[in-house]
Every structure is written in structure tokens, then in C-alpha cells.
Image (tube, rainbow, N blue to C red):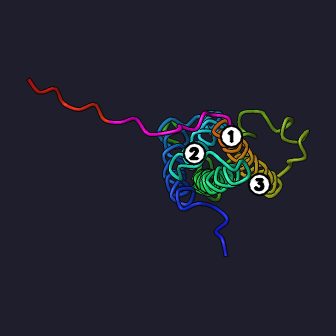
Amino acid sequence: MTRIVDAGAKFAGWVGLGMALVIAIAFELIIPVQTIVFVAAPLAGIVIGVYANVRSERWRPRGRVLLNAGWAGLVTGLGLAILYVIIRLVFIYGDTGALPNGTAINCHTGPECIYLRYVNVGQQGELASMGITDPASLESALWRELAVTGAGLVLLTLGGAVIGGAARTFSKMPTSLPLPIPARTE
């Protein structure tokens, strides 16, 4: 029985998980700008798609190159999506209602505090226009959003990996390795 992906692609998947961890923590916790995670996902996919085949020393056949890239991209994308969702859930269910001025909203920890924050700043009408009328409907909307964004991260990363793998198939395969230059002796 032949293996579906090369050992180098499996290793690249592990490298991709490490890359996903760094991206998620760096841009959700350290610099809380989630948009950067979505910009980084296809770029990370391209890098991991190429790396899977460099690690496997594979240029051809194209199908195998794309499978290697796809595997590494899928593992990376799933890791990135899972980490993204977990970190977002910590923020959703960890909201205690504390305000920057030292006071707190009177609420139960979690989506109720988020909902009351929006209500307190006068955005209840905007929430109602999206079908969000209470903490429970906000919680449902947040879960739907997380499902869509998680799937989007997987697809963005996988798409980038396939592009990276495709680029690898069109790169020129070396015909031979360069010979070392002998040291000069005088």
C-alpha cells in the first residue's frame, strides 16, 4: 500500500500547527486585531504548501505535490481555526462586565455582559436589526459567527497551500546538485 502524502508533508503539518499557534496568539491576544489573522491565513497556507514539498523533495507528479500541500494546509488551517475559536470563546464567556473606569455592569459573566455593553452604549437598535434582542440571541449569533469564521480560516489556509503547491509544480526541478568547490591549495 502506498502512502497518500509524503513524510515531509506530515512533518510540515506539525510545523503548520506551530505557525497557527503563533499567528493566533500574536494577533488575537498580544495585538488584538483579528483581521490580521484572516490576512495571514492564506499567506501561511502558501508557505506551508511549498514547505511540505520542499521537505519531501517533491516536484512531480503534480497530483502528489498538491496532495502534500493540501494535507499540510488542512492541518494548518484546522489548527488556526480551532485556536481562533477557542480564544474568541474565552473572551465571550469570560466577560465579567468590568468597565475601564473601575465600575462594572450588573450582569452574569458571559454573553449577558456583552449584550448589556451594547445596550448601555445605545446600540440596541442595531442589534435588533440583526435579530439580536436578548443575551441568548446574541450568544446564538456569536456561535454562528464563530462557525463561519472558523470554516473561512480553514478554506483560506487550504487555498493558500494549494496555490503554494501548484507554484512548486511549475518551478524548475534541479537536474543535479551543485558540486562543492574544492579549497585552493598553493
Could you say where residue 42 lies in the image, as x and y percent from the top left? 66, 38
Q: Residue at x 85, y 35 (%)?
A: 126
Q: x, y (%) of residue 180?
A: 31, 35
Q: Is residue 174 above or below residue 58?
A: above
Answer whether labels 1 and 3 touch (C-beta < 8 Å): no
Looking at the rendered structure, which numbered label has been put on residue 147? 3
Q: Residue furthest left?
A: 186
Q: Amino acid at mark 1?
A: Gly
* Closer mark to the observer between disc 2 and disc 3: 2
* The magenta segment: 170-179
Q: Which residue is mark 2?
A: 48
Residue 179, position as x, y percentages in the image = 35, 36
Query: Alpha-carbon neighbours of circle 3 within 10 Å: few (<14), some, or many (≥20)?
Result: few
- Is 171 in the magenta? yes
Q: Are discs 1 and 2 less than 8 Å apart at CB?
A: yes
Distance between mark 2 and mark 3 Cα atoms: 24 Å
Which residue was labeled with disc 1? 160
Q: Is residue 6 above or below residue 1?
A: above
